[in-house]
Image (cartoon, rainbow, N blue to C red):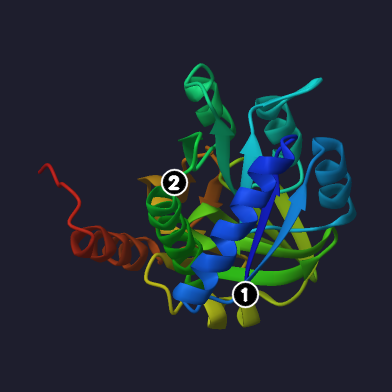
Amino acid sequence: MIKVAFCDDDLTILEELSVLIDRYRVERNQEMEYTAFQSPLELLAEIEKGMRLDVLFLDVVMPGENGIEVAKEIRQYDTNVKIIFLTSSAEFAVQSYTVGAYFYQLKPIWEESFYRLMDSVIGECEKERQFSLIMRCKTGITRIELNKLEYCEVIGRTLLFHLDNGNVLERVGSMDELCSQLTQFEHFMRPHRSYLINMEYIQNISSKMITLASLAQIPIPHGKYSEIKDLYLEYAFNRKQVFLS
């Protein structure tokens, strides 16, 4: 089920978007639900309560509110939602991408362009869902995009998930259980009994340490260097990355 929301102070725009999405989901036979907000404050209140969306159409210029600033607040709670800004001017286009906007849609919105945009954003959402981990952690139920997971470590019975934006999520669990789920994906490797790393983030491998993009250092157990180096080189070769000898 794809969850969509519209936020625009213009009731006419909300009605137009509702008609378009109703047509879209029927013609595409797509399971989706949507909510319309005329006030960004109402939208933010729902997100603060825990509402999670796949796609958000957000007006840039609203009375007393700037959509870019609203998006910055939303990003404190949800880094995954695909934000599509709506505006009748390209004035804020550059700023929109500072908050990870998916698209910047100029008004008026025509059916053909709306359908094309929805096809694209839903395809992206479905691709991410196939490559994500849903778990219960201290902050609630969270979905992690696996390409944003740099590494995971276990301390006692607590798993710490280190994301590429510096955030760390915690949950109680077993590293063995986590590895059984994630080592099916080729870019995860367990170099140490207490660590699982995403090889996309490897910056350096020495005889004693793996250094990741965040400069986190993962210890290499005695006698495991050659095995780890070979695993990484095989992964990099399969990814067709460039080698200099």
Q: Residues within 10 Å of mark 1 (few under 14, many from 20)?
A: few
Give how far across and how far down residue 188 sits, in percent: 45, 66
Res. 186 in view: yes
94 with respect to 87 (left or right):
left
Quadrant the C terminus occupies: top left
Give how far across and how far down residue 46 sits, in percent: 86, 51
Depth check, front residue: 105 or 71? 105
Give how far across and how far down residue 72 sits, in percent: 70, 31
Q: Which amino acid does label 1 sit on?
A: Met
Quadrant the N terminus occupies: bottom right
Q: Which amino acid does label 2 sit on?
A: Trp
Depth check, front residue: 169 or 81? 81
Q: What element carries label 2?
A: loop
Q: Residues within 10 Å of mark 2 (few under 14, many from 20)?
A: few
Give how far across and how far down residue 152 sits, in percent: 61, 60
Q: Residue 182 carries which label?
A: none
Marks 1/2: CA–CA distance = 24 Å
The answer to whether 184 is drawn above or below residue 73 in the figure is below
The answer to whether 102 is drawn above or below residue 231 in the figure is above
Residue most toward the top?
91
Q: Is mark 1 on a helix, strand or loop?
A: loop
244 with respect to 161 (left or right):
left
For mark 2, what is the residue? 110
For mark 1, what is the residue? 1
Look at discs 1 and 2 and give the one toward the viewer. 2
Residue found 68% across the figure and 42% down from its top: 12
Q: Who comes first in sequence, dot 1 or dot 2?
A: 1
49 with respect to 214 (left or right):
right
Residue found 53% across the figure and 71% down from its top: 25
Residue most toward the left?
245
Depth check, front residue: 156 or 222? 156
